[in-house]
Image: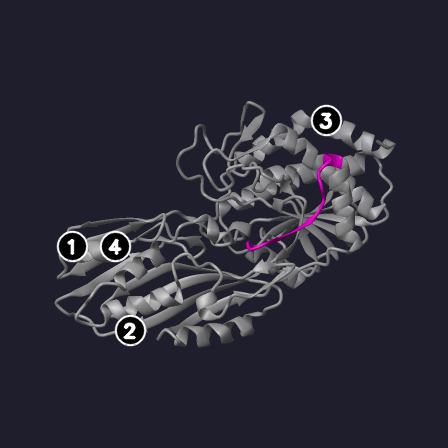
Amino acid sequence: MNDIKSRINEYINAHAEEMEAVLADLVSVPSVKGKPQAGMPFGTEPAKALAKMLDYCEKYGFHTKNHENYVGTADLSESGEPALGVLCHLDVVPAGDGWQSDPFTLVKKDGKLFGRGAIDDKGPAVATLFALRAVKELGLPIRENVRFIFGTDEENGSSDIAYYTKKETLPDMLFTPDGEYPVINLEKGMIRGEAVASCSHGGKKSIVCAHGGTVVNAVPASAYAMLEGFTADEVNAAIADAPEGVSFIYEDSKLTAQGRSAHASTPWEGVNALTALMKVLGRLKTDDETAALFANAALAFPFGETNGKALSLDISDERSGPLTLVFSIMDYEGGKLCGKFDIRFPICLNVPHVRELLEAGLAKYSLALASMTGTEPHYVDENSDFIRTLLRVYEEQTGLEGKTIAIGGGTYVHNTSGGVAFGCAFPGEDNHMHGADEFITEQSLLINAKIFANAIYELLK
């Protein structure tokens, strides 16, 4: 190991206790988005977390600025435009239930540091802060400025960065440790849409209502329908040969389907209870058009299909992988069906093209596209010097293979021109992000700081 790497790693090891103390201080702030207050667009707690972080940055000799409590920045140098930016966020999701300890008190146990924000994204922010301290206090010879950017609204749409970029220009080189290693350089485009249909209803044998799903970006784990005029034998006949992995219960005119949830970016990991229910409802023999309505919906969004083939959306490319589609929320009542879906599409497509295919595909099944919003894919060339340097540092520090990753989800840099995700989670790690007992290991906190410090030096030496 060369002298600079040794000095960086020794510095980080020597500051381990201080890093944990700073993380504990930040975790103690329940920086969940709240009601806007004067001068605090996301409420008091995100603003409080930002103030704490900027105080630490000033204490350590960085040049700070609070951008109206949307974003805070800390520059390594007082002058010169930054050539490199590191983007972290200090807001967190609500704690939720099921914790073994207070989510806003950092608890150390068995080499793990538990607390809301430990991995997403206060732990990575602290690792970056001490990486910058190492570069500064060791006097490493870098030729250009570095800017640390702290956001406060990543968990609710990243309006913080949208505000910041209206006033400031992001550096050409930008990474966020709000993802996973080695480097995420490709994020699929995303579409959320709403399909509608209607039919005659009110027959003696009819589907009265049906509902399923709670959020658009997840495979629905449960769904139900209220039926009228059917015997148990008739319903059980429709349930025969039920889709694999789905359980059905019919009781007191209510048919319930239970599957397994998964994130919309990896729909094959789930079992869609809603599309399974639609398939069964389409088999019923109603004396109105309700069963036919669900039969068509089940053809458009078939159970077990995650690539949009029925709508002629089964398109992929070598870098991105396949398009994915999840029919995630449905409400039917009074002859009117409204269904919501989530699409993640490869870089060979764009939003207008997907819309065109969607409208034509839905029309084949008597469905119409009622509304749609979309964002284009994000891609940074894996052969750039920037990415090659990040991968080399990752390999040198971990001994693991450095490679780029394409994902269906979006990271904090999705709407930037050249940003990538670099850390903080390692391959195969489950840190309970967004769940109970979220944690980062003591070792991971240290190795991340070492990786970031070495990356900053190698990029700017």
| Mark closer to the chain start, 2 or 4 | 2
Amino acid identity at mark 2: Ser
Q: Nearer the viewer, mark 2 or mark 1?
A: 1
Residue 395 visible to the viewer: yes
Task: Determine crowd level at label 2: few under 14, some 14-19, many 20+ residues with C-alpha closer than 10 A.
Answer: some
Residue farthest top in this picture: 110
How far from the left and from the top, in percent, is residue 129?
A: 69, 39
Residue at mark 2 to residue at mark 1: CA–CA distance: 28 Å
The residue carrying mark 1 is: 233
The residue carrying mark 3 is: 13
Residue at mark 3 to residue at mark 4: CA–CA distance: 61 Å
Find residue 198 and name its label: 2
| Mark closer to the chain start, 1 or 3 | 3
| Figure quadrant of the N terminus | top right
How far from the left and from the top, in percent, is residue 97?
A: 39, 36
Instruction: For mark 3, give the secondary structure.
Output: helix
